[in-house]
Image: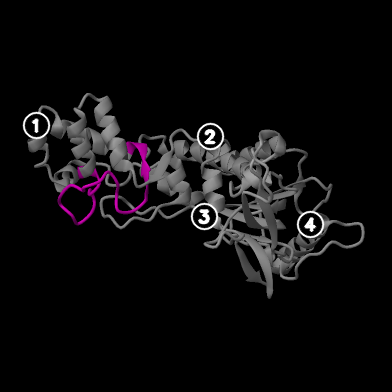
Amino acid sequence: MLVEIHLLQNHVPSNLNRDDSNSPKDCIFGGVRRARISSQCIKRAIRQSDEFRNKLPTIGVRTRKMPQEVKNYLINAGIPENIADHCGKIAATIGTKTDKASDKLETNQIMFFSDGEMKEIAEILKKMATGKTLEQVKGIKPKEVEKNMKSNGNNITPDIALFGRMVTSDLFRDIEASLQCAHAISTNKMDQEFDYFTAIDDLSDKEKGMEEQGAAMLGDIEFTSACYYKYFSINTNGFIDNMMTTLEGSDAAAQAKAILIDVISGFLKGAIFVTPSGKQNTFAAHQLPDLILIEIKDQKIPVSYANAFIKPVTPKGNKDLMDCSIDALKTYVETTFKTFNLESKYRLLLNTKGVEIEGFEKVDDVNGLVAKLEEYLNAEL
C-alpha cells in the first residue's frame, strides 16, 4: 500500500537551501529555471522536527561520532577515561577491513546508527575492557568485537526503517528506504535577486568621539521567492518489512503497524509545520502550505503531479500565485485520474482557499486531516 502526500507552499523572499556558491538551489523544468529545495534538505528538516521525533518510540542518529558515544557510555559505566577512549577508537573501525584501532574518535563514513547498535558495541567493549589495563585493552582487535555482535544490523529504529541507510560494511545492514521524497520545485519561474547590505559600527558617531564615514562592512545575499510543489510517497509494506527484522514476539506485525501509523502522522505534521533552516535568521520564511492532498492506494503506482506546472504559473486577474497554482493542480489531478483510471482507497484534501477537487474528501483543519488519515490507515493495515 502507498500513502502519498502532495503540498503547495509559498515562501516569501528566502534562501532555504543553498548551493556551493550560497545561491538558492535551482533547476530547469519545462524549459524554465525553477527554484528548488533538495530532497535531502527536506527530509533532514522533517527528521529533526519535534512533530516527527515525538511520535517515535526510539530514534536513530546519523553521525560519524559513534565512537565518541561509545566512549561516553563506557565512562558513565565506570570505565576509566583513558581505557574508554581507546575502546571508542576500536569502535571506529568495526565493520571495516582495518583490524586495528583508529587514531581518532570518528568513523570513516557517516552512517545511520540505532541506539541499540551503539549500546551493543559499547556493552561488548565494556565486558572486554573491564578489569584490564590500557596495554591489555590495546590488544583488543575490532574483529573480536564483531564476532560478539548478535544483532547483525537488524536492530534498527523507525526513522531508519523510513529513511533507509546505505553502508559499505557487512556488519551493518543496508536498509532500503520506504519513503520517496521529491526535490521541491517552484510552480513559477525563478527570479534570483540580491540583497546588498552594510554593517555600521555602533561607536562611529559624533557623540562617542569616533566619527567616521561609510560602513564597517559590505555584503550581499542571493534570495528568491517561490511557490513550491512537494511530493512524498511512503511504501507501507516496505516499512513494515524493515521493522519486522527488529521487533519480536507473536504480535510483531501488529507492533510494526502501530508504529507505522504514528510515523506517518508524525511525518505529515513535520512536512506541514517544518521549514528548512537555511538563512532563516535573515529571512524568517515561515509560511504554512495552502494545499495538502493525501492519497491511500493499494496499487503501488506512485504518481507525482509535478507536470501540472510544466508551464510556469503566473498570477492572473484577481487570482494570486497560489490561486493559480491550485487551479493548475486541480485541473491536472482530475484529468490524470480519468485518463489513467487511477484508483485510491481514500483521498483527503485540506486547503485555505475553499477549493474542491473531484474525488477528494475535504477536511477543515490539520487535526481533522491527521485523525482521518489515522482512521483510514487503521482500517486498511
Q: Earlier in the sequence, mark 4 or mark 1?
A: 1
What mark, if any, has residue 55 been given in the picture? 2
Q: Residues within 10 Å of mark 2 (few under 14, many from 20)?
A: some
Where is mark 1, residue-wise? 133
Q: Amino acid at mark 3?
A: Gln
Please say whether residue 114 is one of the residues in the magenta stretch.
Answer: yes
The residue positioned farthest toward the front in the image shown? 209
Q: Is residue 80 visible?
A: yes
Which of the pair 324/314 is nearer the observer?
Answer: 314
Measuring 51% from the left and 36% from the top, which residue is drawn there? 53
Where is mark 3, residue-wise? 40
Instruction: From the image, give the main secondary structure of the stretch colored magenta.
Output: loop
The spot of residue 354 in percent (x, y) is 84, 47
Q: Earlier in the sequence, mark 3 or mark 1?
A: 3
Mark 2–mark 4 Cα distance, whole angstroms, equals: 31 Å
Q: Amino acid at mark 2?
A: Lys
Work out whether 237 lies above or below 148.
below
Which of the pair 222/255 is nearer the observer?
Answer: 222
Q: Residues within 10 Å of mark 1 (few under 14, many from 20)?
A: few
Measuring 75% from the left and 48% from the top, which residue is drawn there? 290
Q: Earlier in the sequence, mark 3 or mark 2?
A: 3
Q: Nearer the viewer, mark 3 or mark 2?
A: 3
Q: Nearer the viewer, mark 4 or mark 1?
A: 1
- Write down the region rendered in magenta: 90-116
The spot of residue 187 in percent (x, y) is 72, 62
Measuring 78% from the left and 57% from the top, which residue is drawn there? 326
Q: Secondary structure at mark 1?
A: loop
Q: Amino acid at mark 4?
A: Ile
Q: Which quadrant of the structure image shows residue 306?
A: bottom right
Where is mark 4, residue-wise? 326
